[in-house]
Image: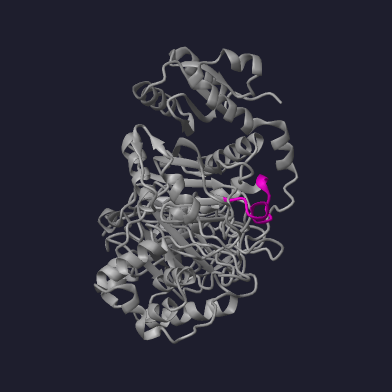
Amino acid sequence: MMTTRNERKQHIFFLRRTNNEAMRLAQAYLSELGVRVTNRQGNAALMGLATPSHVEAAYESGLFAAITAKTISEESLRKYAAEHQEAARLWNAILAPERHEQKKERTHEGRSWADPERETPPPHSLIDPRDFKRALLAFLKVEEEQFLEPYKDEKPPNITGKRFEAYERRLERAYDNPTVAYHLARLAWHLEPAYRLALLKLPIEFIIAFFLEAACWKMENEIAVGVVFVESSREGGPKFSGSQRTTLQAEIVSGLDWLAGQAPVGAHLTWVYDWQFVKIDVANGNNNSTEDYWRDPAMGEVSYFGNSYAEAWSSVAAYRDDMRVRNASAHAIVIFVTPYGTEWHAYAGGSRITLANRNNWGGWGIGTIDRITAHETCHLFGAADEYTGSGTPCSTCGSTHGCYHIPNGNCGSCARPQQACIMDGNSPRLCAYTQGQIGWADLFVELTTADTLWAGTDDTVWLDIGDRTFVLDNPNHDDREQNNVEGYALNYTGVVKADVKRVGIRKSADGFAGGWKLKRVRLWVRGELICDANNINQWLEDEYLWWASSSCGSVTSIVNRLQVKVSTADVMWAGTDDDVRLYLGGRSWNLDNEGHDDFERGHTDTFDLDPGTGLYKPSLASIRIYKSPDGVAGGWRLKGLQILVNGASIYNNQSINKWLEDDDRNWYGMI
């Protein structure tokens, strides 16, 4: 298939010079050109989404030794410089025909991560249990044995499935905070059983210090990724084959590249890789083993630009920090990949991900590692699980997550409806709630459609904040059906709280199914819930397709509601069927109530007008009423006019009494 001039394809760009300065220059050049740079392989190569015109310009720049969207033959590969060959082999693995054939047969596509035919995943905890215990005991200034003494004779039950949900509800009652309960429940699952009781009685000062003020990450800018393959140096010990190793590399890169491709342009998301392949002289564990027995020795074998590390958990943080500083990255994560026996096949926390070949990658197979990597990476940036079922399901839409404190509105236990999402299952889609949680929503809107017959709509809907509007649409999802609750992630808008002059919702003209009944609107700005308008229960249909909050917004001078009352004189032939138009504040409106005979003798007609965007009271100075050329019945005698803004009358003149006819069909007034 021929590529059009504007179609983007993934390319690899090999640098002519391989040093830090050349890499920075090349990356900046491609970004300015419009290439979506998705990852960086050391100082040797960049991968990104580019059009043919981008590629032509990149060649002409002289910065690149080679650029291709195709696999590289072995003959050509031998001609590449040594520093380019590793990136080239990885590129070939990503494009390998057998891998793409495997992808076509995704037999597990769309299945929940809690699929009963697969291994139940462990609960995600953003905070590593070791770090939590250390912080808690330091805060209380006690040893662990002393802290757990009151609970030593207790035997709390296991917390899985319904018991896990019940335990999380107990925590929510204890702390009156569903978000704290969410995190504590998942920590409790990883900690010794006695902690399940102890966590119900933590000092509120610790809760505030540890959870409510915790640092957060947004998935944006450059992020360093240290991928550490951990295999045995022993004869017969756990090892990957060469093809498994390269396939795993390709899967990891593809998973993170998918996230970079999903990211808004404003995120400038690029993954910067460091590959480590270490061997350790450690006997294999089993499927009940925790990772410490192989992870700590592995860290002792990692070498990063002259930095070596102790065999300890703390070395993971040290390695991350070294990568972050060297690459001037926003953040750094570590991904461990191993065939060593481990209690779970995939999990994330403490700024690291572990991928272990346990029971064929939890029953998902090596060809799903890209999606698993994307799922676990989203956890590190604040995204919550959305699946239900056995294990440790999500049980509330009320907990909030990520830097922007976005609710877990796509949780399967309460979503209306649940949408396909990488945080629920093996689906190549990020729902709006997940996008918001990982930092891609400086504006986040949640709309509830009323639970009334015919309440839904397929018409276009906008958010109006006073001077700007935003279309609200979730691709590949049927929005705003009866009783639906849906979030909308509006990213990199530049909007701050003061810019939200009002909170309004506008709908396009009625389509085939008619109007839409709006029940609730919630709006977050950079993580702060600034509007929660419930029980609106207003139909947006016919002539009135607009709703605005009476209490949300930063200014009172903006026009949210505009109502005009026009009185026709009570004299012979005073009425008209001609068109009448109002001019006010530099705008105009046709005054017509569909299905009603307006401007009849002695009648007063009321018109609810959409004020549009950016109309303010001070601009409402001059008034003009215009009638179209006389029809068969002749002129029209205008008796009076009243104008109401936001429910208050700003003009009322019932003594106009002017004929608008022949060549004098205008009336003018001043407010």
Residue 266 pos. (x, y %): 41, 41
Instruction: Write down the region rendered in magenta.
Output: 356-367
Q: Is residue 509 above or below residue 455?
A: above
Indicate yes or no whether the magenta region holds residue 364. Answer: yes
Q: Is residue 656 left or right of residue 90?
A: left
Q: Is residue 390 above or below residue 103?
A: below
Find residue 138 and report its image quarter.
bottom left
In the foreground, 497 or 595: 497
Which quadrant, please, contains the C terminus? bottom left
Q: How many marks?
A: 0
Indicate yes or no whether the magenta region holds residue 389. Answer: no
State whether residue 507 appears in this view: yes
Q: Is residue 181 left or right of residue 99?
A: left
Residue 382 pos. (x, y %): 43, 57
Residue 518 pos. (x, y %): 52, 68
Please name the residue shown 39% across and 77% down the image: 199
Q: Is residue 298 above or below residue 293?
A: above
Please name the residue shown 45% across and 82% down the image: 170
Which quadrant, please, contains the N terminus? top right
In the foreground, 543 or 320: 320
Q: Residue furthest front?
A: 235
Q: Is residue 255 above or below residue 181?
A: above
State whether residue 470 appears in this view: no
Colouring convention used in this rendered image of the protein: one colour
Please name the residue shown 35% across and 67% down the image: 133
Find residue 407 and report its image quarter.
bottom left
In the foreground, 202 or 564: 202
Please name the residue shown 45% across and 41% down the image: 226
Residue 501 pos. (x, y %): 31, 58
